[in-house]
Amino acid sequence: METFNTLVVAWIGIGLATFLALVVFRIRAPYGRHARKGWGRMIDNHWGWFWMELPALIIMPVLSLIGPSAKTPTLLLLTGLWVLHYAYRTLVFPFQLRTKGKKMPISIVLSAIFFNLVNGFLNGYFLGWLAPSAGSVFSIHASIGLVLFFGGAYINQRADRKLIGLRKNGNGYQVPKGWLFTYISCPNHFGEIIEWAGFALIAWNLPALSFALWTFFNLVPRSLNHHAWYREHFPEYPKGRKAVIPYILI
Ligand code: NDP
């Protein structure tokens, strides 16, 4: 357990260093609207998303279920919530995208696969092997976590659908309007940050906390980049809109 905890703390440290590097050097991860040449060979973006997310869909539930830990309601709930999210992100989201002929660098796909392998391993191995009893589903923090998880997932998926829908008639990029877009540029990222914070509250363990932190470390810089991109490309972009946290962040 001690070695495992040390590994997770080191993993959080790597996440923090990544976050600082992305923010300080304003690095724009080169996929989606920030895609550009110079990052090596490319792959179709629908399949890129599929391959990036597939390891997470498989490794965490397999480890949590085959390990010797008691299959408590909390363990089963956490595994189920994980599968719900990753089934959407791996099997539904990539094939809803309406972009045509768009590609992403294989290096991005490989780095996301690496992240998902480590993150899926840490969370699945902890539940399957190390969790003493995986806590109670009926604690106050787990109840709040459940509300946050489902609220965040709803916001994330609704925002994904709205953004994808902007391309309905073969359109290019547009300024998204209405609902949470009135307040922030990236409600999909905002929802995902809330979702994994909720998961960490239910799980109440170090690997789930590390995932919530990594989600923040990944998505806040990406939101800042999206927000800056909107301002560069749309002079009329609403001035009061923030990047990712309503009324607060940038
Ligand atoms: P984006 O919001 O950049 O794009 C989502 C889709 O909508 C893309 O097809 C994009 O087209 C299209 N789109 C977005 N904005 C517009 C617009 N203004 N006009 C027209 N089309 C638009 O999503 P991300 O790639 O940043 O993220 C996708 C999902 O993955 C999110 O739900 C996010 O939370 C999740 N994610 C999670 C991470 C994590 O660490 N947990 C890390 C990264 C993403 P195009 O591709 O051409 O830009």
Image (spheres, rainbow, N blue to C red):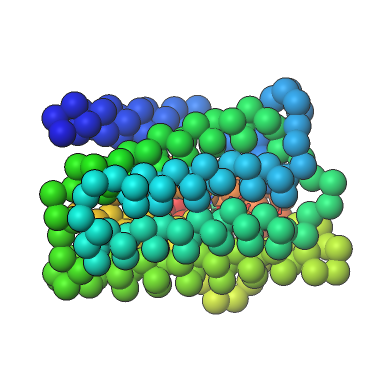
Q: Quadrant of residue 204?
A: bottom left
| Residue 187 seen by the camera | no
What percent of the width, then of the height, locates residue 24? 45, 30
Q: Name above or below for residue 117 compared with residue 148.
A: above
Of 4 and 144, the residue lying toward us: 4
What percent of the width, then of the height, locates residue 226? 59, 49
The residue sitting at 40% across, 42% down in the picture is 120
| Residue 223 seen by the camera | yes
What percent of the width, then of the height, locates residue 75? 27, 59
The residue sitting at 49% across, 32% down in the picture is 114
The residue sitting at 56% across, 61% down in the picture is 88
Farthest residue in the bottom direction? 179
Q: Name above or below for residue 137 compared with residue 208.
A: below
What percent of the width, then of the height, locates residue 64? 33, 49
The residue sitting at 64% across, 70% down in the picture is 162
Q: Quadrant of the N terminus?
A: top left
Q: Quadrant of ligand 1?
A: bottom right
